[in-house]
Image (tube, rainbow, N blue to C red):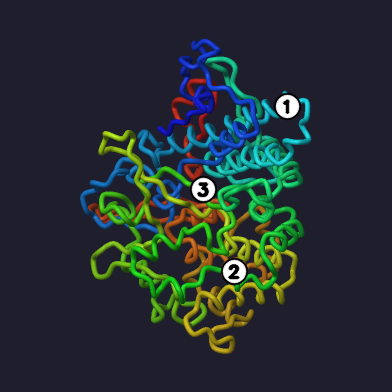
Amino acid sequence: MKKSNLTFIMMGLLLFCGCDDFLNEEPDDRAKVESPSDIKELLVNAYPRSSYFVICEMMSDNVADRGFSNSCATAVTDDEMYHWKDGTDSDADSPFAVWTGWYEGIAAANYALRVIDSKPDQENYNAMRGEALLCRALGHFLLVNLWAEHYDPATASTAPGIPYVTEPETVAIKEYTRNTMEEVYDMIESDLRRGLALIDDKSYTMPKFHFTKRAAHAFAARFYTYKGTDWDKVVYHTLQAAPENFATEMRDYSVLNNMTIMEYMKEYTNPALANILLAVCMETYWNDLYQTCPPKNSRYVLSPAMAYSLFHPNSSNNLQRGRWVYRKEGTGTSVSSMVKFYAYFKNISETSNWGNTYVNMPMFTVEDVALNRAEAYTMLGDTTRALQTINRFLSMRTSDYDPVKHGLNMKRIITYFQEPSWDDQRPEPHYKAELDADKNKLYLMMAIAYLRRKEFMQEGMRWFDIKRFHLPVVHTLHWEGTEIALDRYDKRRALQIPQEAQKVGVIPNER
């Protein structure tokens, strides 16, 4: 567990661990937060600090069972998530660690807001208030999209969401109830809108690690994309987050692919890159540096066969009929890794050889913004702009891109995705009837999901598309020679509430 000299952020764990040690301390023994610099330091801890990579990749259709003994650091979590079981482990990438780590960030944001509220000159703290509100919104947004069913306006008023926490804890053990999905999304939207109006890019010394205006708009674009009811707002926020001709800001693989593997890993998550709008330093075993960590050393991996199907130019699974620029390592029976993540190791003390690994995770990127924009244009019926957006994206993801040879049009997209082999990939969001009534919308959405899966391979994003589009997942079991399936409306799509949270009144998900 991460520690901070601002001890009170641990109060967020009271929500789920039932620990009362902190509250038993004398007030003078606790860290004080008073000055603007104190609040800024506290807000560093308000960003999510635990990674969902392992959880989301293992549950998705990006991995297969290679049948090897699983000796990696996340072996238990890997196995439980691959089989869509309730999480029982507490390693850095487990559901328990993600749940507690994100609520810890929310606790830091709430404490910062309480301190700001106590100031007589609150207007001088507007930028900090805005950042705290955005961090609180982001933490709850990530939590609700893992531990609840996906948002559906028809059921949102009664469907269970998660506890939306807006105040610092002042008691050792407090009973919590789950807000409805409607309440959670309404509160996220409120915090997001208020925060966006207050933040000031000039208040940061390292802006890429904080919510700038562009990063906040990127968050808003994803929020409204996932909500699926306000597509005009998606367009607006994507245009604030990235220029219309966004291709010039996308990650440039013509540069990356000429680097050594070590250089490539470091550069992929370099916050200085134009495409990274918000980077968050997360504690995780998921990296491409250490051989004892996933994805390389897990039993459940992107298999060579899957990698061929998804990325090889000769594969039938090649929509634009060109060579993808994405780099991967692994051939034959070895693991296929996208070699995206360099790990930074930090010793737990100066005299110890033990420590934790950290990765700079690109939380919001220009590429994410572009694909959300394409979805919004699709759902607004603006096929021309949707295709323009997709083809701009492809121009930076296809080797020697030729708009005549590689560019997509509706005829090519429909011909490709109407094949029966794609039937199980037809999205069924709450606006399914609208897609079924308009084949352009249906097949464009399938094309965008196809591109997003490739772009964010081994970054966990595929799982969120699987949830919101209700896509089925089939996992192979190597030694048994059988398969297990997660149907479109299987309740296991929502992670089970951790036992520690259930003990303080958070009702578990149905199974």
| Figure check: 7 above or below 131 | above
189 or 306: nearer the viewer: 189
- Badge 2 local density, few (<14 within 10 Å), some, or many (20+)? some
Q: Are marks 1 and 2 in contact (CB under 8 Å)?
A: no
The residue under label 3 is 280
Q: Secondary structure at mark 3?
A: strand
Real-space Cα distance between discs 3 and 2? 19 Å
Label count reads 3
Marks 1/2: CA–CA distance: 39 Å
Q: In x, y percent, where is residue 443?
A: 61, 70
- Residue flagged by tag 2: what amino acid is it? Glu
Judged left or right of residue 424, residue 378 is: right
Question: In the rendered structure, which disc, 1 or 3, sits on the residue that comes first in sequence?
Answer: 1
Question: Residue at 71% across / 77% down in the picture?
Answer: 384
Measure the C-alpha gap from mark 1 to mark 3.
26 Å
Residue 222: image x %, image y %?
64, 54
Q: Which mark is residue 117?
A: 1
Q: Position of residue 85 (x, y in %)?
A: 39, 40
Of the residues shown, which amino acid type is indicated by label 1?
Asp
Relative to 156, 393 lies left or right: left
Residue 249: numbered disc: 2
